[in-house]
Image (cartoon, rainbow, N blue to C red):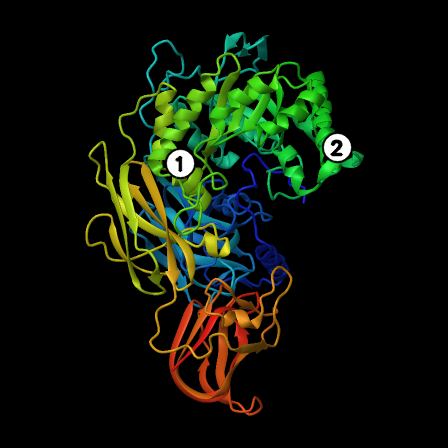
Amino acid sequence: MNPTPSVATGPTRRWRRSKREVAMLAVAVALALTGAALVPSGIANAADTVLLSQGKLATASSVENKDYTPAANAVDGNAGTRWSSERSDPQWLQVDLGQSSTINRVELTWEAAYATSYEIQVSDSGTGGWKPIYSTTKGPGGNETLSVSGTGRYVRMYGTVRANGYGYSLWEFKVFGSAGSTNPPTDPPTDPPTDPGSVNPGYPNQPGPFTQASVVKVTGGSGNWQLQVDGKPYTVKGWTWGPSAAEADTYMPGLVAEGANTIRTWGTGKDTKTLLDSAAAHGIRVINGFWLAPGGGPGSGGCIDYTSDAKYKSDQKTDILNWVNTYKANPGVLMWNVGNESILGLQNCYSGQKLEDVRNAYAAFVNDVAVAIHGIDANHPVTSTDAWTGAWPYLKRNAPALDLLAVNSYGDVCNIKKTWVDGGYDKPYIVTEGGAAGEWETPNDANGVPNEPTETQKAAALVNSWKCIIDHTGVGLGATFFHYGTEGDFGGVWFNVIPGGNKRPGYYSIGKAWGASFSNTAPVISSMTVSQNVAAGASMTVSLKATDPDGDAIKYVPFFNSKYIDGAGGLQYQDGPQPTPGTFQLTAPQTLGVWKAYVWAEDGKGNVSVESRSFRVVAPPVAGTNIAKGKSASASSFQTTVDNFTPGQAFDGNAATRWSSDWSDAQYLQVDLGSVQSFTHVQLLWEKAYGKGYTIKTSNDGNVWTPVKTVTDGDGGVDDFDVSGSGRYVRLELTQRGSPWGYSLYEFGIYQ
């Protein structure tokens, strides 16, 4: 696939869709064509009924994929984009109408992943006080037009029961009615930095709105370079941009208040004008990206042979030059950035001498594009980003037309200077992504998963990275750190500094390094503890200690995440007693494996700190002896496409191995106990692909079977049954899957 992202699209190398998710998506797209419409009687036709939600700020409890299914897609007026949640209940999607409004109609355009049970709710604050104005337990999916009556600034769809094994997904969420009085913003810009010499009213650290295109040049040489804008020195200080272009006016003030002057995108397209215009109006400049396959570094797709694919190169060059022509006179443009992490990403396509040839050809193509850009726009520099400084030799040999180098660097950022010196480079550089060490750089914790830096470490990493870049005087020309994003999912907690629009300590730490001052900042977390090796479904303790430097009251909110089990990115809200502030008694998940627990510490003033720790969910102990362990097993089928998920792995006593069947309903798994034996308990440890309907049977001869337990409403996780059974053979006869996949068991324990 050759993605051509919009300006809101971020890098794909860190969080990727699994093969199973790709298969699910194909099924979902096919099913989407069968959606039916529901139009209740009594729909309001008042003259003052207008569409209130389009283009407004939308948030959600979770997203399936932060790059392709964000909440904003459901209110963008584009029936070809969608929001989708994680695969769990409940989930919600809400829109901020900007002012208290009278609501009389809601239109839902569902993808195949729809809600059978949900409510439409309204709230004045968006954080509580939700009132239902419509509810159903028989939602049909497809296109639903709902007659409602209510008043509020915030409107949300609150889904409680899904129609299938996916999450919830909406192509469009439209709210109609009449707008009322304007409410004050719930998250006003923090106090701006002070600098009496600047000219932007309210934000004196900024040079003011830009009304005409600037001349941007890389000047100097021999380790004494400068980036200059209209003849004045310019140091890049900013972030990679996360919100949609439509949300730019909402989130630009936060950049201004922080003393930032630059944002970076990965793609340039039709919606870029909205972003550029907003940036210029707020005194922010944009590094405009152009995506080239296989962008995104390790694991990314879209293999292109740059030695021979003339059509791809011609098409991409034409597209890039079209957008350069379109936007070169826009006051918001700072420079052009051709490609993202492709030189590293090509290692997933080729090897040996072929890899070297294609990498050199890619760099030569970047040079060809840079020459062409210079030919139509002499006023803005051109660079190219990759994921490692190991890409720079290819650019040095093949791309002399680049005005400066660029690199994405996190935990290794302070080694860039040495690499640059050792490589004998003759161009300055900027860092186009950076921050705390990522998943791919950190050591594993005690549970064998990457040890996420603490909130304090993340904030300090931004400042340390900035110091290392700026200390490379005359060469390091600044940075756009990763990431000014609003998602609060797994990746969002690791990197985003404004999840849900709330500012985290990293926002403030780098803002102070850029010269800003603030009257109110985020809570400070001192410790977090989580129960370890918790039995599935058992009580567990999650505790966070935090203080607020401004004396604000702290609200604590807990979540779980299962990324290291099933690749899920979304966070699942947890509800449980809080005997002391920040300490929760929660119920452990049913699915075995390593989970992460999160606690959000919110100060009610638009600030938040987030901490996470991993914990392991294990099988509940069972009294007695597992007479099936190590015995001979057989099954109707087992998968061999990735690994050999053989039947015996469900009886090996190892909860890290599993049996997995083909993707169809009628399947069985059985064990030969060696002789007729009685048993009193069965324990099934399901992987994500669980059985919803099944029967446990016994037989003395393997031909005549007697049922001992039937289940029609299985929900996965751990199933424990007290039974009375006897036989030499015990069979799990599976009749209905609980997921789109097959059936998969870590362990099938039979106890006496």
Q: Quadrant of the C terminus?
A: bottom left
Residue type, label 2: Asp
Horizontal relation, residue 274 to residue 520: left or right: right
From the viewer's side, name the closer residue of 203 and 498: 498
Q: Residues within 10 Å of mark 1 (few under 14, many from 20)?
A: many
Determine which residue is flagged by label 2: 357
Question: Do tag 1 and tag 2 residues touch (Cβ < 8 Å)?
Answer: no
User: Looking at this view, is 319 or 643 the one in front?
Assistant: 643
Pick whichever of labels 1 and 2 is earlier in the sequence. 2
**Viewer can see residue 37:** yes
In the rendering, which numbered label is found on residue 262? Answer: none
Label 2: few (<14), some or many (≥20) within 10 Å? some
**Residue beneath label 1, please?**
498
Percent of width and height locating residue 271: 58, 34
* Rendered position, 243 above or below 173: above
Q: Position of residue 110 (x, y in %)?
A: 53, 57
Q: Which residue is located at x 27 percent, y 42 percent?
A: 527
- Residue 90: give x, y in percent of width and height: 40, 59
Left or right of residue 240, residue 1 in this image:
right
Residue 173 vs residue 320: left or right?
Answer: left
